[in-house]
Image: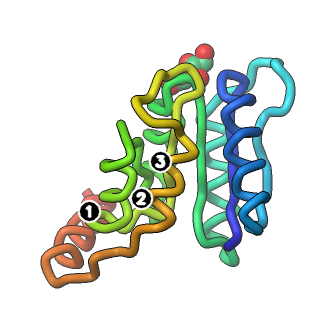
């Protein structure tokens, strides 16, 4: 699969961990993230990743900042993006099964109960449920973009 990944200065190590794991699994990763400790603004990184994703050719986007909060909020403000900020492996799987999120966010300064790699794996190993009720709710999420 093809991934676009972006991060700010607070999640460089986390981004490297996720990227290395994805590449070791045979995935292709476009890295738009900060590579040095120099401070960058997470909204810029979220918008860059979202635009690249929406231009086509990618399966998923991954965005990381210190908490994952600012960068996921921003990604979700770009029309067409559904970005999850899961707390654990269960939520990461549900982000796909129930919400059909194409983006997932993590925090480089957060201590997760399971590792972000395990969470990412759960997200990727899970299929969208695709039932009428999930379709209806996901469509309602997307309709909220018009408010
Ligand atoms: C940067 O210091 C920090 O605010 C950012 O990485 C993120 O946690 C924001 O939500």
Q: Depth-wise, is mark 2 or mark 3 nearer the camera?
A: 3
| Rendered residue at 79%/50% (across/down) | 31
The residue shown at (45%, 59%) is: 123
**From the viewer's perspective, is 76 left or right of 9?**
left
According to the picture, the residue beneath numbered tag 3 turns out to be 119
The location of residue 55, given as percent across then percent down, is 67, 72
How many labels, in total?
Answer: 3
Tell me the distance, in whole angstroms, between the alpha carbons under discs 2 and 1: 8 Å
143 or 97, which is in the foreground? 97
The label on residue 115 is none
Above-or-below relation of 28 to 44: below
Q: Is residue 40 left or right of residue 142?
A: right
Disc number placed over residue 141 in the picture, else none: 1
Q: Between disc 2 and disc 1, whose residue precedes?
A: 2
The image quadrant where one finds the N terminus is: bottom right
Q: Pointer 2 and pointer 1: residues touching (CB < 8 Å)? A: yes
- Where residue 37 appears, x then y in whole percent? 81, 19
Along the viewing direction, whichever of 22 and 139 lies nearer the viewer: 22
Q: Secondary structure at mark 2?
A: loop
Residue shown at 32% from the left, 48% from the top: 91
Location of residue 59 by image quarter? bottom right
Q: Which residue is mark 2?
A: 82
- In the rendered image, residue 35, in percent from the top left (x then y), is placed at 84, 32
In the shown orientation, is residue 134 left or right of residue 64?
A: left
Give me the residue at 49% from left, 22% from top: 110
């Amino acid at each position: 699969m093809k991934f676009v990944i972006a991060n700010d200065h607070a999640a460089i190590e986390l981004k490297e961990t996720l990227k290395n794991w994805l590449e070791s699994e045979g995935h292709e990763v476009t890295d738009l993230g900060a590579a040095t400790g120099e401070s960058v603004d997470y909204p810029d990184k979220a918008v860059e990743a979202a635009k690249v994703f929406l231009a086509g050719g990618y399966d998923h986007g991954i965005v990381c900042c210190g908490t994952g909060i600012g960068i996921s909020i921003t990604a979700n403000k770009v029309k067409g993006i559904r970005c999850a900020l899961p707390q654990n492996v269960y939520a990461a799987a549900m982000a796909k099964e129930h919400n059909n999120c194409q983006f997932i966010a993590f925090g480089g300064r957060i201590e997760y109960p399971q590792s972000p790699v395990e969470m990412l794996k759960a997200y990727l190993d899970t299929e969208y449920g695709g039932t009428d009720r999930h379709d209806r709710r996901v469509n309602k999420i997307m309709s909220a973009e018009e408010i």
